[in-house]
Amino acid sequence: EDGASPHTEKYTQDWCKAHLPAFIKKDRWPVSCPDLNPLDFAIWRVLQNIGCARPHSSLEAFREDFCRRMGQIEYLRATVESYPRRLRSVIAAKKGRI
């Protein structure tokens, strides 16, 4: 994460802790390491493809379509679940340091 307030807010941190088994609290994030940020390396492209796949008549129509389609994407779960492996790889490449 880049330390932006949407990523560090208490609500976001609490949600991530409750829903992401390998979640690391903000005070333990490595500094600017895109290999460890699933949003940087994979998820934004998927979210953009979902959001821009077709025009929507209203914000509410977009929200409904987006939420419905998000539930169908196993790729996002696999991306998040691969985090521990990526973390171990980065630690090994840096000889135990991040």
Image: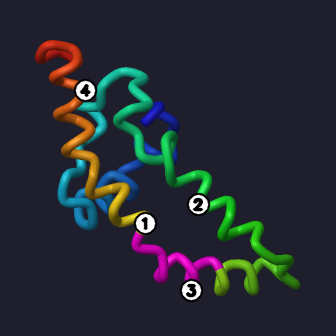
Residue 15, compared with residue 65, is above or below; it is above
- Which corner quadrant of the image does residue 57 belong to? bottom right
Query: Label 1's element?
Result: helix
Which residue is at a point 47% across and 31% down the rendered structure image?
A: 2
Residue corresponding to mark 2 = 46
How many numbered markers are drawn?
4
Q: CA distance from mark 3 to mark 2?
A: 14 Å
Q: Quadrant of the N terminus?
A: top left
- Which corner quadrant of the image does residue 17 belong to? bottom left
Q: Position of residue 24 (x, y in %)?
A: 23, 43
- Which corner quadrant of the image does residue 49 belong to? bottom right
Q: CA distance from mark 3 to mark 1?
A: 15 Å
Sooner in the amino-acid sequence: mark 3 or mark 1: 3
Which residue is at a point 16% across and 22% down the rendered structure image?
A: 92
Q: Which residues are magenta?
A: 66-74
Query: Label 2's element?
Result: helix
How crowded is the residue under tag 1: few (<14 C-alpha within 10 Å), some, or many (20+)? few
> Seen in the image, is 51 located left or right of residue 14?
right
Amino acid carrying label 1: it is Tyr
Q: CA distance from mark 1 to mark 4?
A: 22 Å
Amino acid carrying label 4: it is Val
Sooner in the amino-acid sequence: mark 1 or mark 4: 1
Residue 68 disc label: 3
Q: CA distance from mark 2 to mark 1?
A: 9 Å
Residue corresponding to mark 4 = 90
Do the CB atoms of the residues marked 2 and 1 lie less than 8 Å apart? yes
Amino acid carrying label 3: it is Arg
- Farthest residue to the left: give it: 96
